[in-house]
Amino acid sequence: MKYHKIILAGGNGYLGTVLAEHFKPLAEEVIILSRHSKAAEGNIKTLVWDGKTEGDWAGELECADLLVNLCGKNVNCRYTPKNKQEILDSRINPTNLLNEVVSKLKNPPKLWINSASATIYRHAEDVPQTEDSGEIGEGFSVNICRAWENAFFNTKTPQTRKVALRIGIVFGKADAVFPRLLNLVKLGFGGKQGNGRQMVSWIHEQDVAGITEWLMEHPEIEGMVNATAPNPERNDNQMRLIRQAYGAKFGLPTPAWLLSIGSVVIGTETELILKSRWVLPKRLLEAGYIFKYPDMKGAVEECIQGTSLFARKTQETLIGLSIPLAFGLLMRYLFGIDSWNSFLSVMSISFLFLVPFAIGVLTILFSPLATIRKITYRIFMPWLPIIGLLTLTLAFSMEGFACWIMALPLFLPMASLGGLTMGYFRLKKHRNEKTYASLLVLLPLLISPVEQLIGSIPGRYEAYTYIDIRSNRNHIWENVTRVKPIKPEQDKGWLTSSLGFPRPIRAELNYNGVGAYRKAVFSKGLVFHEEVKSYLDQRSMHFSIKANPYDIPSTTMDKHVVIGGDYFDVLDGTYVLQQLSPGTYRLHLYSHFKMTTTFNFYASWWAGWIMKDIQNNILQIIKERAER
């Protein structure tokens, strides 16, 4: 055998399995240190450790040719305080423990390779990052990388050479990121992610194993080593190469805002996709390592090799997505015909609740039976046609962004409910499952005429906000009655800004008193006409608010949320100035608005949130100006 003993700490994961299989024919023993016991497979055996305390396993490190530390919680999760701590501890604790053990051995491992990450470098779209010229980045992930490498190198081990392997995104058939990217391509979502310009520094699993062995034969190399292929690609080109290799002719792009929503839903972070990692393996290339897969095209083709193009299951899955997507587009078209508003309307319970429910039913009805046995499939797969519907209706200007943001909290759970309902009938093998499916799919068209016949019930709602200001009464009131031009950088309305709503610009009374008038001017041509109905100087002001929807440019707001339109209107507002203590006042701002829908219980929640965001924005501007 070429080697006596190889130790893989934390080697029961994906990369550990790759390395174990690589060294199996080359070493007398391959020992995996794992938290879980496992039966020996030939010369590969597993020893139990906890990564925190020294045990019987420590003696196995004596006379080892190589120690590889792969320990660390998967970063594919939300960065909650709990997860952040676990990500850090799962790397630092085993590294410190191994340092302690290696320092005490008489014949310690000749080489210790510690897994590290190429994400330690900054977001780079301008120049590549190398070991000697690369710039360390900022943020949580980078801090973890730095702490991990510091823990590794802080303890001196004279008899053991140390290499921190800064590994890029690993491509392989069995696990890691590539199968997930391939699944996106199979489902038709294989377009660019974000703007597609972010660089992807990757490496094939066979080169990770090859570099590990190669480092054993090159004792002159120690310290930090970039383990990435020499030819990184942009994200958009990466997805194109995967589509070409698989045989997919198209791939829908995934914009950054949609990735943000999706990352929350599936419990991960967009940084893993959107950060530009432009890293080059300068030390390996200069020392003569020859990559087996230097180009992404060859690596992708190897990973896909043996995968039948559009195999039966994939075709069935695509059908299970295309049919509900087509149904959703048809429903949006029918419910959006103005002349049919007397019995079909987008602004209805039938559309917002029953259409996504029917989409979920169709998704599971046309999915392969084997796939729907997993409850996660029945819950989340119906979301894909919903996301496709969102993308297409936005692309063809059938719907506005703000409307979709408000609709998604209804569409996604209702689609899941439809998936679970249809899954129940299919898994029970009910003989009338298709009859039930037909009835469920027709529910929007059956219920909507009844809903429109009953009609909308107008509701009056209040939005209340206040702010405490340290100034004199006169100065505060002057800023209340005359809101002078507001610069874009002064706008703090995060919600309205995110939804693309117009921002406030100015609002100045022509005089102080009952009957006074002012235009509250917003961007994009939106104007509120305000008339003072009651007035107590420097104490309170009540005013009516009117907005003519026909004066608002059609590009300003979606017709379903336009102010003064069929569904939403602002009625009046009131300022009240209350003294709390000498030099401190509380400025109250009330407003009343009207909702006219069949689902006021939901629409009023959004409207109230938006109104409060606008009011808080105005109050904050008044406070900043009054306290100068």
Image: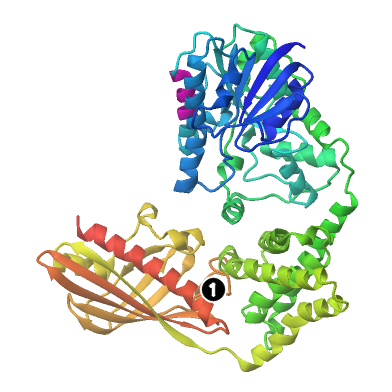
Asked where in the image residue 482 lies, by quadrant, the reply is: bottom left
Asked where in the image residue 202 lies, by quadrant, the reply is: top right
- What's the magenta bit mostly, secondary-structure-wise? helix
Q: Secondary structure at mark 1?
A: loop
Query: Which residue is depicted at the point 17% across and 65% down?
Result: 475
Left or right relative to 244: residue 167:
left
Residue 148 covered by magenta stretch: yes
Please identify the quadrant where the N terminus is shown: top right
User: Where residue 287 sits in the image (x, y, percent)?
Assistant: 65, 9
Above or below residue 563? Residue 101 is: above
Q: Which residues are magenta?
A: 145-154
- Asked whether residue 110 is in view, the answer is yes
Query: Which residue is depicted at the point 48% across and 48% down?
Result: 80
Tell which of 230 and 489 is nearer to you.
Answer: 230
Above or below residue 133? Residue 479 is: below
Query: Which residue is depicted at the point 80% across and 49% down?
Result: 186
Residue lying farthest to the front in this orientation: 56
- Asked whether residue 326 is in view, the answer is no
Left or right relative to 30: residue 219:
left
User: Where residue 301 sits in the image (x, y, percent)?
Assistant: 83, 33
User: Where residue 270 sits in the image (x, y, percent)?
Assistant: 57, 46
- The colour scheme is rainbow
Q: Amino acid at mark 1?
A: Val
Residue 461 covered by magenta stretch: no
Tell which of 523 and 328 is nearer to you.
Answer: 328
Tell which of 371 and 482 is nearer to you.
Answer: 371
Please identify the quadrant where the C terminus is shown: bottom left
User: Where residue 280 sits in the image (x, y, percent)?
Assistant: 62, 22
Residue lying farthest to the bottom in this orientation: 454
According to the picture, the residue beneath numbered tag 1 turns out to be 561
Residue lying farthest to the top in this orientation: 220
